[in-house]
Image (spheres, coloured by chain):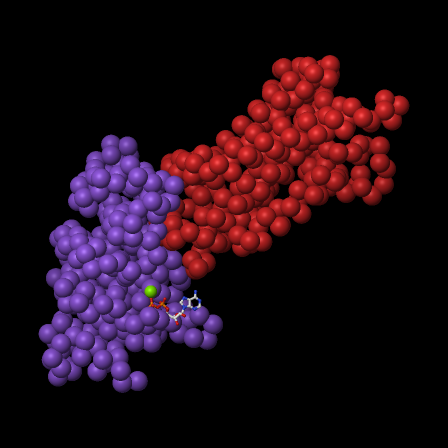
Chain colours: A red, B purple
Amino acid sequence: MKGLIFCKRTVKEILRDPLSYIFCLGFPIIMLIIMTIVNESIPKQANMTVFQIQNLAPGIAYFGMTFVMLFACIQVSKDRNTALIMRLHASPMKSYDFILGYTLSVIIIALLQLAVTFLASYIVAIVVKGELSIPGMFMSMLSLIPSAIMFISFGMIFGTLVSEKAAPGVCSIIISVVGMIGGIWMDIDNMKGAILNISKWLPFYHGVKASRLMLAGEYSEMIKPLAITIIFMIATYVLAIVIMRIKLNKDTR
Amino acid sequence: MANALEIKELKKEYGSKAAVNKISFDVEEDSLFALLGVNGAGKTTTIKMLTGLANPTSGDAMIFGHSIVNEKELVKTFVNLSPQETSIAPNLSVRENLEFMAGIYGMDKEKTARKTQEMIEMFSLQEVEKDKAKTLSGGWQRKVSIAMALITEPKLLFLDEPTLGLDVLARRELWNVIEKLKKEVTIVLTTHYMEEVEALADKIAIMVSGEVKAIGTLNELIEQTGTKNLEEAFVSIAGKN
Ligand SMILES: Nc1ncnc2c1ncn2[C@@H]1O[C@H](COP(=O)(O)OP(=O)(O)O)[C@@H](O)[C@H]1O
Ligand SMILES: [Mg+2]
């Protein structure tokens, strides 16, 4: 209940900040347009499929979640820097109230962003005569929710641990890693060796894969990557609660 | 009369430096207790320990019979503060700020609405209740900040330098508000303004470099030091180091 009240206030703060709309609407649409133009200039013989709309849409939707992480991170570290945090720490709020409040409020941004991404992708698909099924897009969106929660948890962890200035830097490391080994911008399955191995030990490759398989309707194939994604989600979420708890037991500033 | 607060040898060290050094004193229920001291005396650190914002290095304090060390979470439910830095959600309106605090302390919808209205009337916030907190002047923000603490129905309320940075008129107005609060709740107030203490306090502790050097009513302190007024009494106590 306290978590919900805290969520309500955070949603208000977010919706009253113009930065939220840039994140939510601007980013995925721009990426989509740029990458589609790139794809149009790749010759068919190259057999590059990652930029084709059925792969690009879930890829960008997933990549967008890393920006939601940055968003959560900024929100948490911003709160830490205001005097309001003294009140909150002196209140009977518990670590899970904070985490629940942040998660629920930021997930609204994540869902909006996913919706915008898939809607824009649908339009792009019509323009480039690609194929996107509407039920597939819904399923793909659903499969991205665990990843969204995982990234929000990462954001809350960094926002709690590092200073407001350093937080975006730390997030950008994760964003680059996801870009490289998530299989969003290149076809990792065909790149044998180290990269594929590293990818398989991290959640990103699996999350992207699950969202693409969901879009394609290949449900039996996607169970494993989705399960891995959910396990990572639970682990990071629990970690976020533990770290917030430690933080609350320390002195406030 | 019963004690709202009993501090026993409370100490806080930052590194090797003691910000608060084994202070002990009691605060009677339904009184206003002033903690008087210059910047850096340890007033804020004392309040932080008593409100669960900082862990004491040693010692303890009982608030209505409950330990701030062993029963921290319980104590938090009936103690609140208005921090030295004005502490409000900037993008929320005055009304929303008040409702937010009531909710955080577990009040239901009906009670939240009732208490919010009560605070708006008590602090005369009607004309600004729809304004975003960040657009208010310092005096209004301070009133909102205190209202946000009071709405949670604390049994003990800490006001950390409530009139710091306010102009004369805003300060006088806030004194009137605090006079009204005295009837509702036990208050511990910190300040470095002598007039404020003279106007409001039932009892005074003078804090110097983390230690309580003298304690008593206004008249007792003046008598103890053989001086004419609080300022002279303060100088004679805080000056001899
Ligand atoms: N978080 C902290 N870390 C290190 N030193 C601190 C911290 N908070 C306060 N201090 C030191 O403790 C002393 C008392 O500070 P404070 O309680 O804020 O005084 P006051 O509120 O009376 O002005 C000061 O010397 C201050 O520098
Ligand atoms: Mg202070």
Residue B223 shows up from this direction: yes
Q: Residue at x 58, y 25 (%)?
A: A116
- Pick the front one: B65 or A6: A6
Residue B180 appears left or right of A241: left
Instruction: Write the residue at 20% across / 74% down.
Output: B215
**In this rendering, would A2 be left or right of B144?**
right
Residue at image location 18% in from the left, 44% down from the top: B124
Q: Quadrant of residue B166?
A: bottom left
Residue B99 in view? no
Q: Quadrant of the C terminus of chain B?
A: bottom left
In this view, the residue farthest toward the right is A45
Residue B159 position within the rendered picture, expressed as x and y whole percent measured from the top left: 26, 58
Ligand 2 location (quadrant): bottom left
Q: Residue A58 in the image: state x and y as whole percent.
A: 67, 27
Q: Classify residue B2 by image quadrant.
A: bottom left
Residue ID at (24%, 55%): B157
- Quick check: A27 above or below A74? above
Instruction: Specify the quadrant of the image occupied by residue B132.
Output: top left
Horizontal relation, residue B169 to residue B102: left or right: left
Q: Nearer the viewer, residue A22 or A145?
A: A22
| Number of on-image labels | 0
Q: Quadrant of the N terminus of chain B?
A: bottom left
**Residue A219 image offset from top left, x and y in percent:** 69, 20
**B226, above or below A79, in the image:** below
Q: Nearer the viewer, residue A138 or A39?
A: A39
Q: Position of residue A153 (x, y in %)?
A: 56, 42
